[in-house]
Amino acid sequence: MDLSLSIVSFPVDEQTASDMTTLLKELPAEQRTVLHPSLWRAADSRGFAVIAYTSQEELIGFAAVADMVGLHHYEWSLFVHPNYRRLSLGTALADGVSHALAQRQAESELAAFAGDAEIAAFMESNGYQPEFNEILLSAEPLPDNCLPEGVEVVPYAGEAEELRALLSAGFDDTIIPIMEHNMIDPEREIWLLQKGHQLIATATLVTEESVLWVTAFAVHPDQQGHGYGKQFLKWCRQFAFQRGLTEVLLDVETDNDALYVYEKSGFQRIQTISYWKHRTV
């Protein structure tokens, strides 16, 4: 079979995006997230796709690669039509990703796959090793939510040093470049939960189509155990309701101690995403 592989930068043209959407039509919506569909046509997105067409101009597989925060750290995944998986097309697409990342002088890469029990053998055969797993959680928007007296959620307004200290305490210093990107990206809204004038927690909210993503969520370690995380997450769900969105999503590493907080706040596990890193010699 004659196949044509090519690399196209985001945003891809309308016909290519339509072909990619059609190829994924039987794939559950939650499994499409790792393929970054909201970025394919976004004007300011950073990334590319490796696409495979037959001689009859049928798209039978592609890899989608995104620089999520503009720091040359890429995440990618791929999908091949079930009828063509015996052609080693997945390996060809992965090779195309590696070639394009080398051209772009990528600082790092992670491959992500959702709910695919057969992916381990494929990734290991292509020189990748498991890095970590995340659980994707979902909640419905919440019509009503009342914060306790004295607690409020306000938009970020330049409190950079306080925010830096909170995120460093909640994560580590590797979160700082992401914070700095969130500050200047108009698509990312930083919100702060305060009691009085004390910064308690933060979250960055990102809207993708009809979904609200909760990212960079952190409660200061000194304030944990008082219910602030649960209150803030319910506020995020109410925020989604007010925006007319249909779902709230967040992901968390499987060994994160805060997993129970998300579940107590109405989030349910919907799938596990495995992340893979290229094996170093």
Image (cartoon, rainbow, N blue to C red):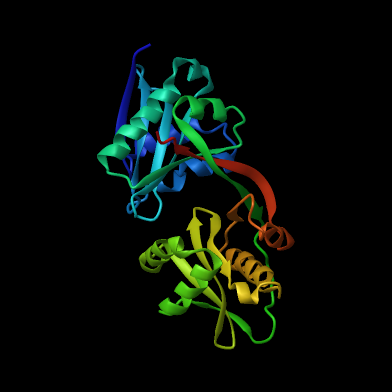
The part of the image, by quadrant, that contains residue 228 is: bottom right
> Residue 113, position in %: x, y?
53, 37
Where 184 sits versus 87, above or below?
A: below
Lateral position of residue 185 relative to residue 217, left or right: left
Q: Furthest residue to the left?
A: 103
State the residue at coordinates (53%, 33%).
25
State the residue at coordinates (52%, 18%).
83
Does residue 59 appear anywhere in the picture? no
> Residue 180, position in %: x, y?
38, 66
> Residue 239, position in %: x, y?
58, 68
Q: Furthest residue to the front?
A: 281
Lateral position of residue 171 relative to residue 269, left or right: left
- Total labels drawn: 0
Q: Nearer the viewer, residue 14 or 196?
A: 196
Image quadrant in which the C terminus is located: top left
Does residue 96 appear anywhere in the picture? yes
Image quadrant in which the N terminus is located: top left
The part of the image, by quadrant, that contains residue 15 is: top left
Where 63 sits versus 30, above or below?
A: above
State the residue at coordinates (66%, 67%).
234
Q: Nearer the viewer, residue 96 or 124?
A: 124
State the residue at coordinates (46%, 36%).
21
Q: Furthest residue to the top?
A: 1
Lateral position of residue 223 relative to residue 190, left or right: right
> Residue 185, position in %: x, y?
37, 64
